[in-house]
Each structure stands twice: as structure tokens, then as C-alpha cells.
Image: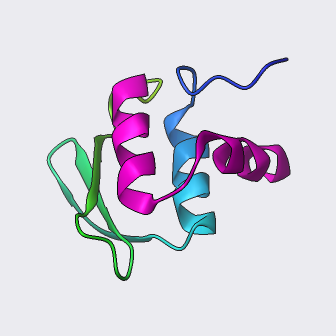
């Protein structure tokens, strides 16, 4: 099955963030806030929306400096 960033569950997304070095900081309502040392912005997403919206994943890839291909390789190992 082809890898799609439009169909990532919140549980798998949390695992991905941990693998790339992000640390869960806190929750604010429905939002989870994660931090990566050296990143310009925090990683913020709504944990109640399943799956994680594609535009959110794309924004986070930009913040993290990770390509879609590298993300696909990480997800294959999860």
C-alpha cells in the first residue's frame, strides 16, 4: 500500500514525533504542543481530529526540516 500523509492516525503521528526527537510539552484543550530543540516553532495539532489533517502534517514537515520521503521511511519502521 502506498504511503499517504492524508491518512495518519494521531497515535502513529505521536510515535513519529517521538522518533524525530520531539518532546510532548503540554496540552491546551484539544491541542497537543510538542517541541524540538532548535526548531523555530512548536509542533501543534488537535488530538481530537482523526486522522491528522494533511495540511498540518505538511506544515510540521517544514518546521522539522524533514522530507516526505524521510517521513515515509520512518513510518515503515514504526
- Residue 40, by quadrant, is bottom left
Residue 74, magenta (yes or no): yes
Name the residue rendered at 35%, 27% in the picture: 55
Q: How many marks?
A: 0
The prevailing secondary structure element of the residues shown in magenta is helix
- Residue 2, by quadrant, is top right
Horizontal relation, residue 67 to residue 70: left or right = left
Name the residue rendered at 73%, 45% in the picture: 75
Name the residue rendered at 43%, 25% in the picture: 54
Q: Nearer the viewer, residue 11 or 16?
A: 16
What sort of colour scheme is used for the picture?
rainbow
Question: Residue 23: percent from the left, percent from the top?
Answer: 42, 73
Q: Nearer the viewer, residue 17 or 24?
A: 17
In the rendered image, which quarter contains the N terminus? top right
Range of magenta residues? 53-78
* Location of residue 17 with respect to 44 vertically, above or below: below
Question: Residue 10: percent from the left, percent from the top?
Answer: 49, 38
Name the residue rendered at 83%, 52% in the picture: 77
Question: Residue 26: percent from the left, percent from the top?
Answer: 25, 66
Regarding residue 53, the answer to whether it shows in the image is no
Residue 28, magenta (yes or no): no
Which residue appears farthest toward the left when viewing the image?
29
Horizontal relation, residue 55 to residue 5: left or right = left
Regarding residue 78, the answer to whether it shows in the image is yes
- Residue 30, by quadrant, is top left
Question: Residue 48: percent from the left, percent from the top?
Answer: 32, 31
Amino acid at each position: 500500500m502506498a504511503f499517504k500523509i492524508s491518512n495518519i492516525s494521531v497515535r502513529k503521528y505521536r510515535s513519529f514525533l517521538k522518533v524525530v526527537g520531539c518532546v510532548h510539552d503540554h496540552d491546551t484543550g484539544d491541542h497537543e504542543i510538542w517541541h524540538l530543540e532548535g526548531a523555530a516553532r512548536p509542533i501543534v495539532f488537535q488530538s481530537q481530529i482523526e486522522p491528522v489533517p494533511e495540511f498540518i502534517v505538511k506544515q510540521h514537515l517544514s518546521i522539522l526540516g524533514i522530507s516526505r520521503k524521510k517521513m515515509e521511511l520512518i513510518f515503515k519502521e514504526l
